């Protein structure tokens, strides 16, 4: 294996690292749209829950108003009876009943006012969410256009890098290129090649036998680190 083959593989690895960065940028761009759509879904659920809460308050209000009407009717009835009662003890009992009913109606009226306040708060929230929906689709469309433009630029750069990689692969000995590809199946991208430094693998610092180092430095063969499994590169094929 010639030193130039090592250098070409090193350049391929370097270019693949750059491609990974461009792919990460594409993912970051797409995340902008994903985030906005997730916010839209979240607000949709929030609106649904708010509408349900409002409906529950309406039911509660309706029930309170019904009960309030019944109690107020009963109060009026008791007051009418009170005017005709001559027995003092009975009159006191009726008055006591009227007082209790009035206390209950006052509490119910306070609860109704509280419900009206809560309904107003929910209505404001519904209005705010509705306004959000009136603008979010436009915002998403505008950002989607930006993302598409940026992603196209990133993909163009990736295509250029892949073209360069393809050219480099065409001049590397097939058997060594195959070994590189096989190694790439089990080693994370961008870390397939490791230079020998101080008699050890640069990546995991595992000591490399002197005989193996001599074989690697001569460029005659491809050797692998016995610890991490990466392809060991000669010092004179400097990693870029």
Image: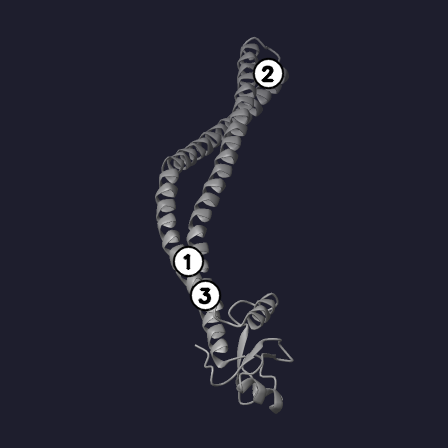
Q: Position of residue 222 (x, y in %)?
A: 58, 79
Quadrant of the snapshot with the C terminus: bottom left
Q: Does residue 67 sit above or below 54 in this rendering?
A: above
Quadrant of the snapshot with the N terminus: bottom right
Looking at the image, is mark 3 or mark 2 nearer the viewer? 3
Q: Does residue 64 sit above or below 31 in this rendering?
A: above
Q: Which of the two residues, 148 or 209, is positioned nearer the viewer here?
A: 209
Q: Which mark is residue 91?
A: 2
Instruction: Identify which residue is drawn at 45% across, 29% down.
Output: 116
Q: Which mark is residue 165?
A: 3
Q: Which of the two residues, 79 or 58, is positioned nearer the viewer here?
A: 58
Instruction: Find residue 145 and report its image quarter.
Output: top left
Instruction: Find residue 165 and report its image quarter.
Output: bottom left
Cα separation between marks 3 and 2: 104 Å
Q: Secondary structure at mark 2?
A: helix
Q: Does residue 92 sit above or below 53 in this rendering?
A: above
Q: Position of residue 40 (x, y in %)?
A: 45, 41
Pointer 3 local density, CA inside 10 Å: few below 14, some 14–19, many at least 20: some
Q: Earlier in the sequence, mark 1 or mark 3?
A: 1
Q: Earlier in the sequence, mark 3 or mark 2?
A: 2
Q: Earlier in the sequence, mark 1 or mark 2?
A: 2
Taking 173 as reference, is 150 left or right? left
Q: Is residue 238 visible?
A: yes
Q: Which of the two residues, 135 or 181, is positioned nearer the viewer here?
A: 181
- Looking at the picture, the colour scheme in use is one colour
Q: Which mark is residue 159?
A: 1
Cα separation between marks 1 and 3: 10 Å
């Amino acid at each position: 294996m010639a030193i130039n083959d090592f250098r070409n593989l090193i350049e391929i690895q370097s270019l693949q690292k750059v491609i990974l960065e461009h792919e990460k940028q594409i993912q970051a761009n797409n995340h902008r749209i994903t985030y906005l759509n997730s916010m839209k879904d979240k607000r949709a659920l929030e609106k649904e829950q708010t509408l349900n809460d409002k409906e529950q308050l309406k039911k509660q209000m309706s029930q309170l108003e019904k009960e309030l009407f019944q109690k107020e009717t009963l109060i009026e009835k008791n007051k009418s009876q009170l005017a005709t009662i001559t027995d003092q003890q009975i009159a006191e009992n009726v008055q006591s009943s009227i007082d209790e009913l009035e206390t209950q109606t006052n509490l119910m009226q306070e609860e109704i006012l509280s419900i009206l306040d809560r309904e107003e708060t929910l209505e404001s929230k519904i209005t705010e969410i509705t306004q959000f929906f009136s603008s979010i689709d436009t915002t998403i469309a505008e950002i989607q256009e930006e993302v598409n433009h940026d992603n196209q630029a990133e993909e163009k750069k990736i295509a250029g890098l892949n073209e360069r990689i393809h050219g480099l692969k065409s001049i590397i000995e097939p058997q060594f290129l195959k070994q590189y590809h096989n190694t790439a199946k089990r080693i994370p991208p961008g870390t397939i090649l490791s230079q020998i430094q101080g008699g050890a693998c640069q990546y995991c610092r595992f000591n490399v036998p002197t005989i193996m180092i001599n074989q690697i430095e001569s460029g005659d063969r491809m050797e692998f680190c016995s610890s991490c499994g990466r392809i060991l590169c000669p010092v004179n094929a400097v990693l870029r």
